[in-house]
Amino acid sequence: MESAASLAELQAEASCPVCLDYLRDPVTIECGHTFCHSCIHQRWEDLPGTFPCPVCLYHCPDRNLKRNTQLCHIIEVVKQIPTTGNERKLQEEKPLCGKHNEVLTLFCDSAQELLCPHCKVPLDHQDQSLIPIKEAAASCRKKLKRYIGALLVEVEDAETEYENQIAKEFEVQKKVEKWRKELQYECKELKCSLQIEHDVFNAGLLIEEKDVEEKLTENGRQVSNHMFILNKLLSEIAEKYLQADVDLLTEEICLVGMGSEKREEDDGFEVEEKGDQFKTTVRKEGDGWI
């Protein structure tokens, strides 16, 4: 039994997971699984980008197929091991009927039971033909093979859908990256435009600030000159005020002339009006003195 199980395991290891037959020209892919060269080539033929393993779905980055020469020799040896009907199957001891101690050779499909030639078939099953175990097993294997084929098709469809999803995700990533770059470019352009407007506005402010400062400086200079003239005039009048009566009255004409002279020295301020007012006042006071 142990040798039969080991033989079955060895035969399974020598089989291709895709075609379920002995490996032909075995090649090993990056994840470590081995397939027939023609089987894996057919599965990967129209796939772009990465290449999934049919067993574990590991995505191989390229079509790197390593020929397994040693396994190829082992398969040739396994093929030489005799099997009944040249079929790869588990070499089991033939089971015996529990009632009659005879080898079970028949299978009742309706009752789903194994029978020996001495077993009584139920009356409601007698119209059903009994099938030899080998034929029943072969029929069962055919059904399983169809199921396996259908499942492989579904797996292939799922892999194709998975690849399509990866491709769509890649396209979305490309679009998002494109939008990100466009947004960065627009922000850069907007920032540049705002900087230009800022520089122009700032330059205008600097010019206006300079003009205002120049005007304030000029006005300050004029006010300073005006104050200087007024202070000088005030000082001179105060000196006249302290003079003797005769000297004060004698120099009235000079004082009036001095007022006119001060008006001519003034830079745009109304000193002339102040001089006239002062002259009128002096004359009135002088008339009172005479």
Image: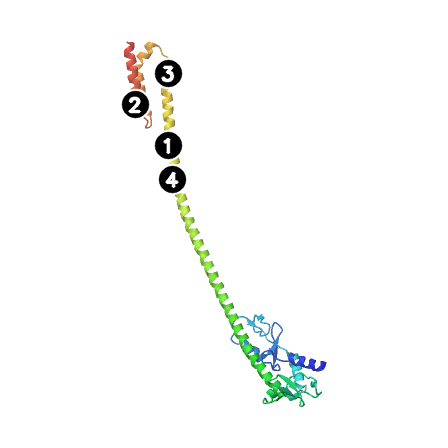
The kind of residue tagged 1 is Glu
First in sequence: mark 1 or mark 4? 4
Tell me the number on the disc at residue 218.
Answer: 1
Q: Kindly report the distance in space between the C-alpha atoms of the residues bearing marks 4 and 3.
A: 44 Å
Between 212 and 40, the residue placed more toward the observer is 40
Residue 262 in the image, given as x and y percentages of width and height = 33, 22
In percent of width and height, residue 66 lies at: 61, 76
Residue visible at 37% across and 19% down in the picture: 234
Q: Which quadrant would the C terminus be assigned to in this image?
A: top left
Q: Earlier in the sequence, mark 2 or mark 1?
A: 1
Q: Judge left or right: residue 20 versus residue 255.
A: right
Which residue position is annotated with label 3? 238
Residue type at mark 3: give it: Ala
* Residue that numbered label 4 is attached to: 208
Q: Amino acid under label 4?
A: Glu
Q: Secondary structure at mark 1?
A: helix
- Residue at image x 38%, y 43%? 204
Q: Quadrant of the N terminus?
A: bottom right
**Going from the N terminus, do you reach mark 2 or mark 3 first?**
3
Q: Residues within 10 Å of mark 2 (few under 14, many from 20)?
A: few
Q: Secondary structure under badge 3?
A: helix
Give the amino acid type for the residue marked by disc 2 in the picture: Glu
The residue labelled by disc 2 is: 273
Q: Position of residue 184 (x, y in %)?
A: 46, 56
In this image, 94 relative to 256: left or right?
right
- Describe the element under mark 4 as helix, strand or loop: helix
Residue 249 vertical position relative to residue 228 in the rendered view, above or below = above
> How packed is label 1: few (under 14 Cα within 10 Å), some, or many (20 or more)?
few
Rounded to the nearest angstrom, the CA distance separating label 1 from label 4 is 15 Å
Looking at the image, residue 63 sits to the left or right of residue 243; the answer is right
> Residue reaching furthest front?
123
Between discs 3 and 1, the one toward the N terminus: 1
